[in-house]
Amino acid sequence: MQDPRTVQRLRKGDGNVLKRLFKTHFGDLYPMAFRLTHTEEAAGEVIRAAFTTLWNQRDTLDPFEPLSQILTKYVYEAANAYRHANGLVGIASVDAESDPDPSVARCLDRLDERQRLVYMLCVVDGYSFKNLARAFDTTKVAVQEEVGEVLIALDTILQEEEQSLDTPTPALL
């Protein structure tokens, strides 16, 4: 839980608080920014844009609303603006260690972009339902339901792939 005095200090224009918040939250925000923008440079720009928005909106902040959730929303909005401006499609992987199993990755390709994004941000990157609800401007329950639907869809696709592997392929003449 954040200290409400942090928001009060932001409202007073304390740039040191903004710097501290940047250092504290950068690592948590980076996976989403990178996944949506596909490059390190763009991810950095998106995060800086989110902090600029935070600074510009400091007078309207609720001292009891977690800044991590607010920043997640600002990163998501800035990344979507970047994606739109640059015609990006697809979801990038942060690194080889976070990539899903190849069979899961193949199945993810059969999902639509929103479903892949939800899976990657929630399951792979570990964003909470609450943070994703804030970013997607929806409810925590709606995000939970969406994750559940994605997992069911992936399970169905995996079962289809397993069955296709079990079914002998007809021999060509």
Image (cartoon, helix red, strand yellow):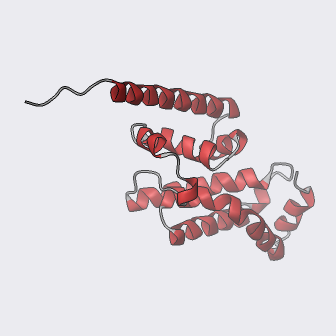
Q: Position of residue 11 (x, y in %)?
A: 83, 65
Q: Position of residue 45 (x, y in %)?
A: 56, 70
- Between 61 and 114, the residue placed more toward the observer is 114
Is residue 151 in view from this perspective? yes
Is residue 78 visible in this depiction of the protein?
A: no
Q: Residue at x 35, y 30 (%)?
A: 165
- State whether residue 150 is above or below residue 167: below
Q: Position of residue 4 (x, y in %)?
A: 90, 56
The residue most toward the bottom is 16
- Number of marks in the image? 0
Spot the residue most to the left.
173
Identify the residue at horizontal 49%, vertical 32% (top origin): 154
Residue 13 is drawn in which quadrant? bottom right
Query: What residue is rendered at 63% in x and 34% in y?
Result: 143
Question: Residue 52: x percent and y percent?
Answer: 66, 68
Q: Quadrant of the C terminus?
A: top left
Between 108 and 101, the one lying in front of the other is 101
Q: Is residue 70 left or right of residue 123?
A: right
Left or right, 9 with reference to 35: right
Q: Name the residue: 58% across, 70% down.
A: 44
